[in-house]
Amino acid sequence: MPSPERGDPAAARRVAVELELELPLGGAPPYPGAAPFDLEAAVCSHGLFMMAPNRWDPASRALVRPLRLASDRAASVAVRVSRHPARPSDALLVSVLGAPGDALSPPDQTSILEQVRRMLRLDEEDGRAAAEFQAMHAVAREAGFGRIFRSPTLFEDMVKCILLCNCQWTRTLSMSTALCELQLELRSSSSTENFQSRTPPIRECKRKRSNKQNVRVKLETKFNEDKLVYLEDPNLATDTANLQTYENSFNLPSAASGTGNTSEVSLDHSELKLRNEPCLEDCGGDFPTPEELANLDEDFLAKRCNLGYRARRIVMLARSIVEGKICLQKLEEIRKMSVPTVEGLSTTPSTYDRLNEELSTISGFGPFTRANVLMCMGFFHMIPADTETIRHLKQFHKRASTISSVQKELDNIYGKYAPFQFLAYWCELWGFYNKQFGKISDMEPINYRLFTASKLKKATVN
């Protein structure tokens, strides 16, 4: 089959690479009484799956988003994850479009599959934890609940955990969308270096305000006039409008078809249109990397993405990673030393405490943010508690609590599920959301903003 010519964007867009991702133990339950792997349950299990650039297509039951390439961290490709049409019980189909050159290199293919594994928690230890939890929780086993969706990288998880703090859900969604739109601007500019060179260098972050203002004005002129209105007065733009923009930036894929073998398929424009497959331009931007954020001006980032005080924390995190002060690989290696399971409780607290201490040195990482990050890393014995937790306990369990007393109540209710207290709490809360709003995996993304405290307070509990 002929390959597209290098440097031809249209030809590159016609290339489709389909990769097979084997499920653990062929998709069979790794523990007696546990449920087999369920893609829908693994993706639609936490609000992180609703945040850009993730996109769950309720029609085809597939996850669509950009993923980074190992050969070039500045490059992304659109990826679609679905059940394998020929082997639905023991494999997933990972379809990649817009691949540069003739095909994805073997390292790029491996990297993409590893990112998918991380999002869906397909490692052996993740499967074992889900199975052990389901063995003690009948409702979770029946629903196939046990794997909590997360991001392809720890950095994206950390930033999104910052976005979860001290704001309504609609704003969290909007901020994540804005960061992806900014990344698209970085990618669409003549070069990222050219765009970033117009932001204040790190060593000049304390320059006089008049000079910083000039830099911000130059940056803002690269956006069109309607975006400038949003930058000058965020109140003129609603979160709903921002979400609608991201909603419209996608071309949703149809259900996958094919042989299921790793392959390259050359498509002409008419066939591409019929299949309606996603390409990178349809994904509205990838989530930015530390390198893309480290040199941006904090004030510009706060204003561009409506981040408020979070912009400084995100930029400082990105700079610390780029400068080597924070090593994400080291944090991941510490995590692998011990993950909480029923059979391994003796070593869990020391590993958790060590990681918790490491995260506490990062500016802006309070108890709630750290608990969420550690949950993403695979620790489920601590429950990140906020006002939503207090509301749930009052509404569902008829227990009044405060921020200072809520952990005691959580221990009383969910302690019997140790070391999976969070999974028990989240299974209950997520089930409540499904009853209140309808099946979450059937919802259109534009309706994700309905998850608000005011609506939940009005809910009735059977």
Image (cartoon, rainbow, N blue to C red):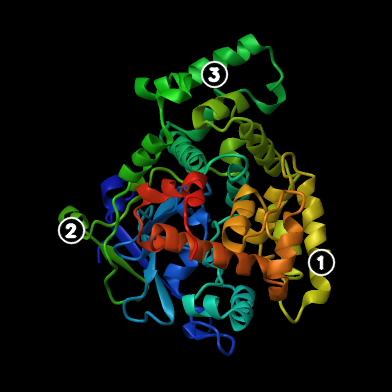
Residue lying furthest top: 210
Q: Nearer the viewer, residue 69 or 29?
A: 29
The CA span between labels 2 and 1 is 53 Å
* Between marks 1 and 3 in the image, the one whose residue lies nearer the viewer: 1
Q: Amino acid at mark 1?
A: Pro
The CA span between labels 1 and 3 is 46 Å
SS state under label 1: helix
Residue lying furthest left: 270
Q: Which residue is mark 1?
A: 349
Residue lying furthest bottom: 32
Quick check: can you spot residue 115? no
Name the quarter where the N terminus is drawn. bottom left
How many residues crowd around disc 3 within 10 Å: few (fewer than 14), some, or many (20 or more)? some
SS state under label 3: helix
Q: Residue at x 62, y 79 (%)?
A: 128
Q: Nearer the viewer, residue 180 or 449?
A: 449
Q: Residue at x 56, y 29 (%)?
A: 301
- The disc, 2 or 3, on the residue closer to the chain's N-terminal end is 3
Q: Indicate the quadrant where residue 92 lies.
A: bottom left
How many residues crowd around disc 2 within 10 Å: few (fewer than 14), some, or many (20 or more)? few
Quick check: can you spot residue 120? yes
The CA span between labels 2 and 3 is 43 Å
Q: Residue at x 31, y 52 (%)?
A: 12
Q: Which residue is mark 2?
A: 274
Q: Is the residue 346 above or below the residue 167 in the image?
A: below
